[in-house]
Image (tube, rainbow, N blue to C red):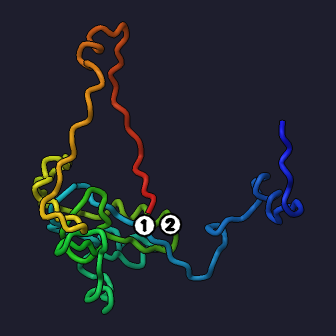
C-alpha cells in the first residue's frame, strides 16, 4: 500500500467530542428571546386555483401569531414589481404567496407563524382550504409543441430520438421465473 504524504498538522475539532457523544448544541437548540417559528403549508393539488383559505381556526390556537396567505402577505416593492424567475417561461413567473394560482403539487400556499414549531405545525392542520382543480399534464412528451424556443435560436423544439432497443421486455418478463409487483412510497424531499 502506498503511503500518501500528509499536508499540514492534524487538528482536533473543537466540538468533535460533543458531536459524537450527543452533547453538542445545534442552531435549533439555542433559545433566542421572542423567536418565532414558521411552518409552510403546501398545496394538495397539482394545478388549479385556491377558492378559499379559512385561517380562523389556526389563528385561534394559543401561540399562533399570524397565518400568511396570498390575501395578506406583506407587500415588498422590489418583489412585486421587479421579481424575475430565471427558470420560468415568459409570462409564467412563479411568486410564492402572490396569488391564488396553483402551478405545481406541493406549492407553498400559506405560512403559519407561531411561538414554537410544534404549535405552527399543529395550526397548519386546521386551515380550511378549498380548491378549483384544473387538468394537469405530467408527461412532458405530450407538451413538446408548447415548449419555448431554446436560447440557441431554434424556432421549434426538437424531439429527442427514441432510445435504441435493448431487448424484448415483454418476452423476458413472460419467461422470468420470478416476478415482483409492488408499490413504493417515500416522503417528500426538497433540496432547494
Residue extending furthest toward the front: 153
Dots 2, 1 in contact, CB < 8 A: yes
The residue carrying pointer 1 sits among few (fewer than 14), some (14 to 19) or many (20 or more) residues within 10 Å by Cα, namely many
- Please name the residue that numbered disc 1 is placed on: 39
Q: Secondary structure at mark 2?
A: helix
Residue extending furthest toward the bottom: 77
Mark number displayed over residue 113: none
Q: CA distance from mark 2 to mark 1?
A: 7 Å
Where in the figure is residue 169, as x and y percent of width and height?
27, 20
Where in the figure is residue 133, as x and y percent of width and height?
13, 57
- Residue at 72% x, 65% y: name it: 25
Where in the figure is residue 64, as x and y percent of width and height?
42, 74
Q: Nearer the viewer, residue 115 or 74?
A: 74
- Quarter location, residue 41: bottom left
- Quarter location, residue 130: bottom left
The residue carrying pointer 2 sits among few (fewer than 14), some (14 to 19) or many (20 or more) residues within 10 Å by Cα, namely some
Tell me if residue 186 comes above or below residue 171 in the rendering.
Answer: below
Mark number displayed over residue 117: 2
Tell me if residue 45 comes above or below residue 26 in the rendering.
Answer: above
- Residue at 67% x, 72% y: name it: 30
Tell me if residue 40 comes above or below residue 2 in the rendering.
Answer: below
Tell me if residue 93 comes above or below residue 171 in the rendering.
Answer: below
Q: Nearer the viewer, residue 160 or 12?
A: 160
Amino acid at each position: 500500500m502506498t503511503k500518501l504524504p500528509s499536508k499540514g498538522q492534524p487538528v482536533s475539532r473543537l466540538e468533535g467530542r460533543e458531536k459524537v457523544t450527543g452533547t453538542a448544541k445545534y442552531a435549533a437548540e439555542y433559545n433566542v428571546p421572542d423567536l418565532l417559528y414558521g411552518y409552510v403549508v403546501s398545496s394538495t393539488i397539482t394545478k388549479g386555483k385556491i377558492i378559499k383559505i379559512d385561517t380562523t381556526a389556526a389563528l385561534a390556537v394559543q401561540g399562533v401569531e399570524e397565518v400568511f396567505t396570498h390575501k395578506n402577505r406583506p407587500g415588498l416593492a422590489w418583489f412585486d414589481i421587479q421579481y424575475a424567475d430565471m427558470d420560468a417561461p415568459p409570462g409564467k413567473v412563479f411568486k410564492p404567496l402572490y396569488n391564488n394560482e396553483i402551478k405545481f403539487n406541493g406549492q407553498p400556499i400559506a405560512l403559519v407563524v407561531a411561538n414554537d414549531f410544534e404549535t405552527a405545525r399543529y395550526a397548519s392542520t386546521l386551515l380550511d382550504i378549498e380548491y378549483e382543480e384544473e387538468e394537469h399534464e405530467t408527461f412532458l412528451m405530450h407538451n413538446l409543441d408548447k415548449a419555448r424556443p431554446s436560447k440557441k435560436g431554434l424556432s421549434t423544439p426538437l424531439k429527442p430520438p427514441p432510445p435504441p432497443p435493448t431487448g424484448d421486455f415483454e418476452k423476458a418478463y413472460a419467461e422470468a421465473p420470478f416476478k415482483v409487483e409492488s408499490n413504493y412510497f417515500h416522503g417528500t424531499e426538497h433540496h432547494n
